[in-house]
Image (cartoon, helix red, strand yellow):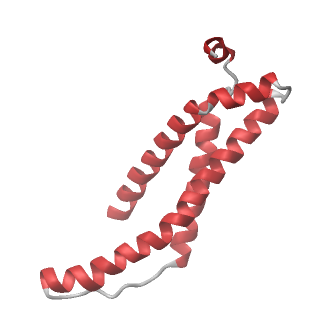
Amino acid sequence: MLNILTLALAGTALALMGLVIFRLRQGSYTLLYVYGVRRKSLRGRLIAHSMLVTGLLALLATPLGIFLGWVLVARVNPVAFGWALPLHLYPGFWLQVWLACLVIGAFVGALVGNPVRLETLKNE
């Protein structure tokens, strides 16, 4: 249950981060539209970019998470409590987490909505 809660919290943070980043980058997509790229193509690019960002974050976070888990299990627990747990690695679980990150990326890309906001060009 604690794993599910942790993953849900991390997924929510990842989705919110993606929404903020792509709202800030909306001007770039609007300029691409002005240069002649169709809206449908821009939506596909936005979803692909979002999936790429979340997928790369998942791949980069995995070694860090393994290292932190090892530090807690092998170093902190023996000093703090006098016992240590075995550290088991579960590649199937990592695959599920990576797939969840890609789904979150696709969800964020779809949730951003229309990447073209012509009102943003008025200020430039």
Q: Nearer the viewer, residue 60 or 91?
A: 60
Pick out the residue farthest to the left: 81
- Look at 59% across and 34% down and name the residue there: 111
Above or below: residue 97 compared with residue 90: above
Which quadrant: the C terminus? top right
- Look at 67% across and 16% down and name the residue there: 121
Tell me, yes or no, if residue 89 can be seen here. Answer: yes
Location of residue 110 by image quarter: top right
Query: Percent from the top left, x then y, of residue 45?
Result: 74, 41
Pick out the residue farthest to the front: 124
Above or below: residue 62 compared with residue 91: above
Q: Is residue 69 left or right of residue 56?
A: left
Location of residue 30 by image quarter: top right
Q: How many marks?
A: 0
- Look at 21% across and 81% down and name the residue there: 77
Location of residue 67 by image quarter: bottom left
